[in-house]
Image (cartoon, grey):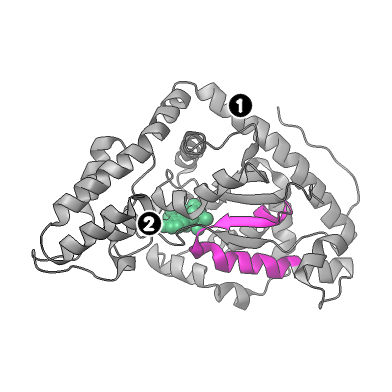
Amino acid sequence: MSDPARPRILTGDTPTGRLHLGHYVGSIENRLAMQETHECFFIIANTHALTTRAEDPAGVTADVLEITKDYLAADIDPARSTIFIQSEVPAIAELTWYFAMLLGYGRLMRNPTVKDEIIVKNLGDNYSFGFLMYPVGQVADILAFRPQWVPVGEDQVPHIEMCRELARKFNVAYCGVDPKTPDEEHEKLGVFPVPAAKVGRIARLPGIDGKNKMSKSLGNAIYLSDDSKTLRKKCNQIFTGRMSATDPGETDPAKNPLWAFHDAFNHDKAEVADMKARYAEGKIGDGDCKKRLAEVLDTMLEPMRQRRAAFDADPKRVLTVLREGTSRANGVAEETLMRAKKAMKFDFFSRSLRLE
Ligand code: ATP
Ligand code: MG
């Protein structure tokens, strides 16, 4: 069991691009707060990125480095948090096999995040077998680290629910744990805890298109690494639904990114309330509110850009962070795998793993 004084968390990102504002409020903020008090593992899920980018592994590898720099720029501290590469932790792939056997195909296909991704990413019925494997792989990503918490955005909650089911199922099937055992007791009696999702301050930040959640693969994101000019341009492109000065525009804040972003990032609440009132009366337009938003975001992103520039200039340091993190991650994941195989009576030989 991990140190009870420092509960463990596991979360991460798919290297399908760089980190955006949705990641920040959905997950990174929680990570920054929790790295003070928790033992943190952050996975860069490069194998999962292949679900939609199988023809471009080199691009995925480039994004592994970009995301690592985003973490460091956001102030994730590699001395306190473990940042690691999924494909270099083989225990995860092995656990994926065992979990896949415990998961019904029908149950997987009922997962709303899987259904949603098939639609928004336009996968039709051309998705790979590997695409369906990724939620199972994600269960292994998480359980390999036996965490108490998984900080995620709202879209990932169905995956965490599946993870909780599989943790219980494994413990019942192979560790003799009574199916009626409360979740909090599982880690003591079985191999796996039943980890809980911790959703960020903003559960689902919309993209600048106002249609979908902000997403790396949908071309609707403001990136943490965007420069001031790009930021201003993207703020100007934000969809508000306003057709004229007297039109209030899209009034559902969930569909109007202009206000969703002001609410999320502009900490001067009185200013935002005043702007909304004057906007509704037709006294100010989209342009003024977008300009102010760009200023607010620019102030927030500037220190991250500066930290990022230091890592851009020192790629060796980034690789060292990844090597050290992946090495620590292998220590924990190998131990979990060994415990799981022991419970399954599949523990023929012991082994050790060392990164060069
Ligand atoms: P992709 O388009 O490749 O799926 P993504 O932008 O959805 O990329 P992920 O790597 O899938 O990003 O998600 C990483 C983490 O960030 C997850 O915990 C996810 O829930 C959270 N997250 C992603 N987008 C948002 C968003 N718009 N609002 C809040 N949280 C988000
Ligand atoms: Mg996603």
Q: Say if the magenta span includes residue 143.
A: yes
Quadrant hosting residue 285? bottom left
Task: Please determine whether, in this image, residue 199 is positioned above or below residue 29.
Answer: below
Pick whichever, 54 or 320, lies toward us.
320
Pick whichever, 243 or 314, lies toward us.
243
Q: Which residue is mark 2?
A: 214
Badge 2 residue CB within 8 Å of ligand 1: yes
x and y, in percent, of residue 161 in the image: 62, 69
Residue at image position (61%, 26%) is: 320
| Horizontal relation, residue 145 to residue 227: left or right | right
Mark 2 or mark 1, which is nearer the start of the sequence? 2
Residue at image position (48%, 26%) is: 311
Task: Please determine whether, in this image, residue 264 is positioned above or below residue 307.
Answer: below
Q: Which residue is mark 1?
A: 320
Density class for disc 2 (Cα within 10 Å; few <14, some 14-19, many ≥20) is: many
Name the amino acid type tagged 1.
Thr
Q: Main secondary structure of the magenta part?
A: helix
Disc 2, SS: loop
Residue at image position (74%, 65%) is: 167
Question: Is residue 211 visible in the rendered structure shown here?
Answer: yes
x and y, in percent, of residue 139 in the image: 66, 60
Disc 1, SS: helix
Pick whichever, 182 or 113, lies toward us.
182
x and y, in percent, of residue 22 in the image: 42, 53
Quadrant hosting residue 151? bottom right
Q: What span is in magenta?
A: 140-167
Distance (Cα) linking label 1 and label 2: 31 Å
Name the amino acid type tagged 2.
Met
| Horizontal relation, residue 211 to residue 289: left or right | right
Q: Nearer the viewer, mark 1 or mark 2?
A: 2
